[in-house]
Image: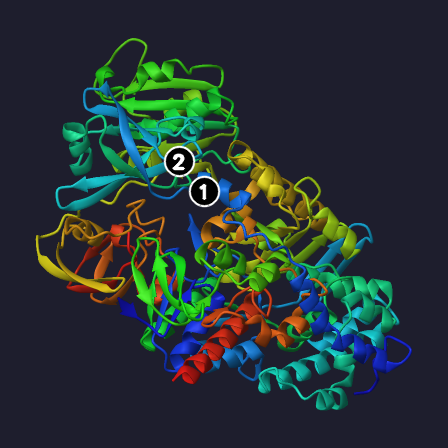
Amino acid sequence: MAFVFKKQIFGFMDLLRFKKLVPNRRKMLALGADTPLPKTYRVNETAHILHPGNQKAELIGIELVAPDTKTYTFRIERPLYFRAGQYATLGCRVGESLLSRPYAFSSAPAQGLQCIVSFTVKNAGFFSGYLFESAKIGDVFTVGDPSGEFCYEPLKDAKHVIALAGGSGITPFYSMAQAIADGTEDFRLTILFGARREQDIILRGQLEKLLSDRVRVVYVLSDEKKAGYEHGFISADLIRKYAEGDFTVMMCGPSAMYAYEDEQLAAFGLPPRRVKKEANCVASRDAAPKQYTLTVHIGAETYTVSADARETVLTAMERAGLRVPAKCRAGGCGFCHSKLLAGKFTIAGADKRRLADAKFSYLHPCCSYPDSDMELIVPQG
Amino acid sequence: MKKYDAVVIGAGNGGLAAAVRLLQGGARVLVVEKHNLPGGFATSFRRGRFEFEASLHELNDFGTADNAGDVRVLFDELGVTDKIEWMQIPEAYRVISREEKLDATMPFGVAAFVDRMEQYVPGSRASVQKFFDLAEEVRLAQAYSSSVNGNTDSKYMVSRFGNFVRSGSYSVNEVLAALKMPKKARDILNAYWCYLGAHCDDLSFVHYASMVNRYMMRGASMPKMRSHEISLAFVERIRELGGEVWFNTEAVRILTDEKDGGVAGVVFADGTQVEARHVVANCAPHVVYGKMMDKVPAEEVRATNARKFAGRGFSMFLGLDRSADDLGIENHNYFLYDTMDTVRQYERMRTIADNDVQATVCLNRADPDCSPKGTCMMYFTTLYMSDDWANVTPQEYYKVKNSVASRMIDRFEQDTGAKIRDHIEEISVATPMTYARYCGHPQGVIYGYESQYWDGLMPRLLMMGEDHRIRGLRFAGGYAMRLSGYSSAYFSGEIAGRQTVGDIKREG
């Protein structure tokens, strides 16, 4: 060492100071309060309202909003607060299966703080069919965390949003319209709402109460020509008629609609940041029926279940009654993140896994179809 | 009831390292994690065509195979180094401070750093070189201390590492003043202070010097696939060694033995229990003693109450639809301050209204291919030194977080001249609420207990033995003896794991 460090006049005084570090800390620790340590903290309590986790939800209202669509209203145990456009999973036991599906909130964020949430559901599949036919007032479901990024982002989105809604894809925009009306959100929303016929337009009465200089709805009927309605599909010309200047496109509807709208939007040359699509649940695939065996490790337990090549790994596990994590059902949220020990699979659509997930053989069962027998480690649901 | 030698609560960096160490020591180990992913803060997330790093700015003390830092040596021993693809960060940092009109970009390498400092501050060379000489002695003294498990021979310490002992009780500013370092050089050298989260009148010199020295000696590293790659590599290793990892499994209670008050088992949120006489808790003592144990020794309650929470985290993540070159983002790692008076800066960081500090990374400057061609991604982090976020209601929450994020963008554009606001393709913002949600830390703290003068690195290491008061319970992670930060958390896990192996062996 080239030099001798010295802070005080005599080096030994620096040494003595060093020796006091321990007695000094010992003294400070003993001076702490003897009050019991807190069980909770304010930031954590607010976090628990923003992300309350799964909770019980009592069905308190069912309203028919179109011939094949109902709004279900629930009273939840704890308040929650979401961003308009987000979804949550709604779940219950159906027969032997523990099922849940993601639905956009169709209620306003502010109502969540009063422990009331609603989902507007079209009768279109197994779970919605169950809701439509069997759910009754007083039934108890589970409602999960507010999730998803299909929301208005003031720091990146244009002040004007052109919403392209197909069928029950109107629900996140209905929530946004309510949030604009009550001052929670601040942007201009023009909804181009595609339906087949006038009678298929859902939530119409509710939407019309919200119309203002900030919220506008244009109905576009594909199968009917009627005065006061646009006719056809939501084409480039139609978008051009209602969009001027800088705008962000948000679309929610069936996959076929997205394919059509992508073509229509090509003419506008919008950068990717100006177009958002809500993801759709992965459906069964068009393949020959074939049975495989899944060996599933959850915690200390191991289960053997059968899977059909046409269904996702998640669906097979749910059908067998396993308690497994499920949220977006579109491969994007990563909530069902599971480790593959053996076997082959095919991902539906784009691979949305993290880079290291692919490297270490993790998969998202919600968007993966089995191509062989498989062995997996799955977190408990 | 299932039985394990040890349960690791929390699969954060400390818990993961502890689990591997325990398994290497022959223990039967269960790791439980309440989230569905490992790593705690060490993770990543996808938004559109971007995969964002959640927290790691750069890994300190890792180095390369032929210039290995202590973390690489540890990872080698734990058997994870080769499961991860590594890359090196190109330069140390650019620090910009408004009050002093300071704008300095510093390289890695001790000699290069001293040379660059001399360019910025003529006449600084001797004092800056002395800083690194001292820092190197600190490093050697720490290596000696860990080689004897903290049971150091004080005569040997004084004779061999006299400068370390003589400087060991002082703050950063006290030592730099004693070295007669010019003010501007101190300002540039102190840029890293926000990584440790205590101001330089309070922050222990040896802690700071040790970190700076390691950055300069070894450079800084990143896993190619974000820190998620490290976390998954650890899980892979744990399973290779026969350990179990259960995700979505929250430990809610630690059962204690009637006779000695020590650990007897762990209860999970779904009510199931496992038997174990040892727990490594990769979480805050505040959480363990506040809600996971029935009877907490009075001494332990006092000691925990005495401690001060360090910074509460806030981060903004941006995916931009132009390249870093196009947007004028020149550097990998920025520190933007109002002032280099760290005491005053620390005070300003107490409130949402006053805090404009940011530590910002453009990952493409380290790895041009980390996002699609023609894009780049950035993350911006700050700390709050009080619980001002507790005053934000759920209704105000999104507005407040967006306003802070917007100020961060303005600040970055004003201070660096880059233009980013009109090119945001993806944005995600994490607040103290986010950190509280994912990791369960009180008030959204991300830095554990603050490195205050009396509770700094040296006294914590020297008191490791007596801080262990409950049989079978040891702590790892940012609240433990090595303080916060990635490297520290891995080391604390290694120490807690190794000590628990010793505890198990003594029990026979």
Q: What coloring was used for the rendering?
A: rainbow
Q: Which residue is mark 1?
A: A48
Q: Nearer the viewer, residue B425 or A319?
A: A319
Q: Quadrant of residue A242?
A: top left
* In the rendered image, the vertical position of residue B68 relative to residue B298, given as above or below: below
Whole-percent x and y of residue B167? 78, 76
Front in this rendered view, residue A24 or B270? A24
Q: Earlier in the sequence, mark 2 or mark 1?
A: 1
Q: Secondary structure at mark 1?
A: helix
Chain of the residue under the numbered disc 1 shown in the image: A
* Residue for point 25% across, 54% down: A365
Give the residue at the far top of this rendering: A227
Q: Which amino acid lies under the numbered mark 1 shown in the image of this protein? A: His
Task: Find residue A78 and name its label.
Answer: 2
- When the figure is inspected, residue A242 is found, relative to residue A332, above or below; the finding is above
Residue at 39 percent of width and 30 percent of height: A115
Discs 2, 1 touching: Cβ within 8 Å: yes
Residue A11 lies in quadrant: bottom right
In percent of width and height, residue B285 lies at 53, 60
**Horizontal arrangement in the rendering, residue B94 relative to residue B487 (left or right):** right
Q: Between marks 2 and 1, how big is the CA–CA gap?
A: 9 Å
Q: Residue furthest right?
A: A9
Q: Residue at x 70, y 59 (%)?
A: B198
Residue B63 showing in the rendered view? no
Q: Is residue B281 visible?
A: yes
Q: Position of residue A82 (x, y in %)?
A: 43, 35
Outermost residue, front direction? B259
Looking at the rendered structure, the secondary structure element under dot 2 is loop
Q: Residues within 10 Å of mark 1 (few under 14, many from 20)?
A: many
Q: Residue at x 53, y 70 (%)?
A: B469
